Amino acid sequence: MILNTISNVLIFLGISFFIFRVIMEKENNLIDKLPTFERFYLKTSVSLVLVGALSNLIINYNPEISEIILNIGFGMLLSWSVFFYLKYLIKNKK
């Protein structure tokens, strides 16, 4: 289903943005100040989401409708968070 593919693309792009813009950012990085377990937990969880979305895209996985709805929700949520980050947080840093 095309909606699942679009949502997996949004999830993949949103998590990729989060990894490269927020987690790997070196100036004023709050992630590096977290305790070791919390850093590991965060990095592992976003990595697993990234791998899951990418594998769904590669194998063209078509799940049940409830999982498609969940993927659409995650895709929309991550898209909103990227938009929010770029519009409000980057603007306020300058």
Image: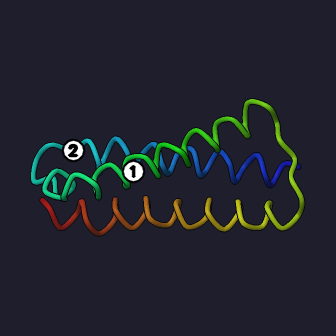
Determine whether the residue tagged by mark 1 lies in a helix, strand or loop: helix
Is 83 positioned to the left or the right of 2 in the image?
left
Q: In which quarter of the image is residue 90?
A: bottom left
Please, what is the three-letter code of the amino acid marked with disc 2? Glu
Q: Distance between the residues labelled 2 and 1?
A: 10 Å
In which quadrant of the rendered image does the C terminus lie? bottom left
Q: x%, y% of residue 45?
A: 47, 52
Is 41 positioned to the left or the right of 64 in the image?
left
Please, what is the three-letter code of the amino acid marked with disc 1? Phe
In this rendering, the answer to whether 87 lies above or below 36 is below
Residue under label 1: 18
Is 6 positioned to the left or the right of 63 in the image?
left
Using the image as rendered, state which of residue 35 and residue 6 is in the foreground: 35
Sequence-first tag of 2 and 1: 1
The residue at 31%/46% (across/down) is 21
- Give the image's coloring scheme: rainbow
The residue at 50%/51% (across/down) is 14
Using the image as rendered, state which of residue 34 and residue 67 is in the foreground: 34
Residue under label 2: 25
Instruction: Using the image, tell me which numbered label, if any, was put on residue 67.
Output: none
